[in-house]
Amino acid sequence: MKSLYEYIIEKCIVEAHHLLNGDNSLGELAADLVEFLQFQFSHSINKNKEYDNKKFIYYYIWDYNEIVKWFADNKKAFHYPAFLIENNSTICLKISVGRMVKGRKKQHNDIELISLYGNERGSHSTKSIDGNSKNHTIYLNAYLLAKENGMGVREFIMSDKFEKELTGTVRHEFMHAFDSYMIVGQRRAKIDKMKAIYKNYRKNNNIKKNWMKFENCGVWNGSAFAVDEDFMNEGNNLRTFYYILLYYLTDTEMNAYLQTFYNQLVSENSSNPYDSDIYRRYKIIKSILECSFSKDAIQRNFDDMTKNEIGVSFGIKSNDLFVFYEKLRLHLLEIVDRFFVKLHKILFDIAQAL
């Protein structure tokens, strides 16, 4: 007889393309956490703000016991995912409510600090408890999101926009949590190495967040994206694009972005994929991979170190630079095409439901 864990892998991973449901529903978990947080911010919060020296924010944090106790005290069901129960793991909620860059030296670099570290929308961090058990902290930058929407933090948290943002964060970040149990061993080590190479490249080359959205790589005309080939042929831009793919084309990120794609369309009650910035982002990646670039740009951007770091990550080898580049380009196109099959399966299911 198959275990529940094996059943989850077969039914929720293969058939539903990572849209976890049933006992592992991330949608029901998100709805519960929205209700919990909106209650907290509609009443006096009986806890002290804490300060995060890395993110430069003040925040509240609720641990697992506080969350569970609230549901029990209010006689409400808490839809806690089975994969966390099976692994004896817990969750925390961390919500930013203010910002301050402490220290004179850091204040001089305030703009750079904000750009690089201080304004991510949300994230997920994991701390091992013992063996396979983990504590998963889900962070939402309510302070930044409130400012983006022209609201106060409390006003934003009580709004529908907060529900949309937190639901998207829970779906995305708890997919990472799911994969932290599902993807292990050599496969996990490979993904971790790819992300480490990507992060090191961004840091060493001061790559800003506009690159993550490919803002300068071309222009949209309706549903068509025209690549700016002049820009891509300039300097190290082609190299930067491929290093960023070390992040976007890892299994863990593509799995989590399926959740984000689903949430973006459902929250907009839409079956138009171009209403999702995730769909548009991967469409840009596909369009650039389909382009031909100058031999000069390829020679300039792919030295031995680049070939080793990117090539080894994706399993591509060749002594001939141009053969290497073409094999790499086609291999990554296959990965993107397989990802679009999953996106379109989700899109079909949404269209059928609307």
Image (tube, rainbow, N blue to C red):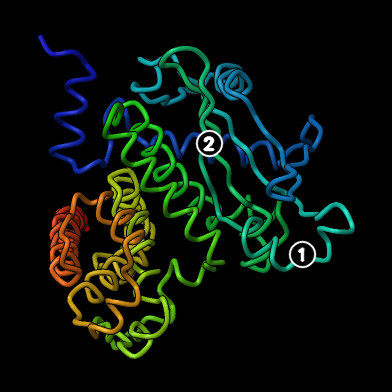
Image quarter in which the C terminus is found: bottom left
* Of residues 291 and 209, the one drawn nearer to the viewer in this rendering: 291
Residue 200 in the figure: left or right of residue 152: left
Q: Position of residue 329 (x, y in %)?
A: 18, 67
Q: Amino acid at mark 1?
A: Asp
Q: Label 2: which residue?
A: 125
**Farthest left residue?**
1
Q: Is residue 36 left or right of residue 152?
A: left
Which residue extends farthest top?
1
In front: mark 1 or mark 2? 1
Residue 232's place in the image compared with 113, above or below, is: below
Q: Amino acid at mark 2?
A: Ser
Q: Which residue is mark 1?
A: 110
Location of residue 173 with respect to 211 vertically, above or below:
above
Element at label 1: helix
Residue 210, position in %: x, y?
50, 72
The quadrant in which the N terminus is found is top left
Quote the CA–CA distance across marks 1 and 2: 24 Å
Left or right of residue 205: residue 7: left
Query: Residue sitting at 25 percent across and 70 percent down?
Result: 283
Front one among 159 and 208? 208
Q: Image point 20% across, 36% down: which residue?
A: 13
Residue at position x 46%, y 39% in the image: 31
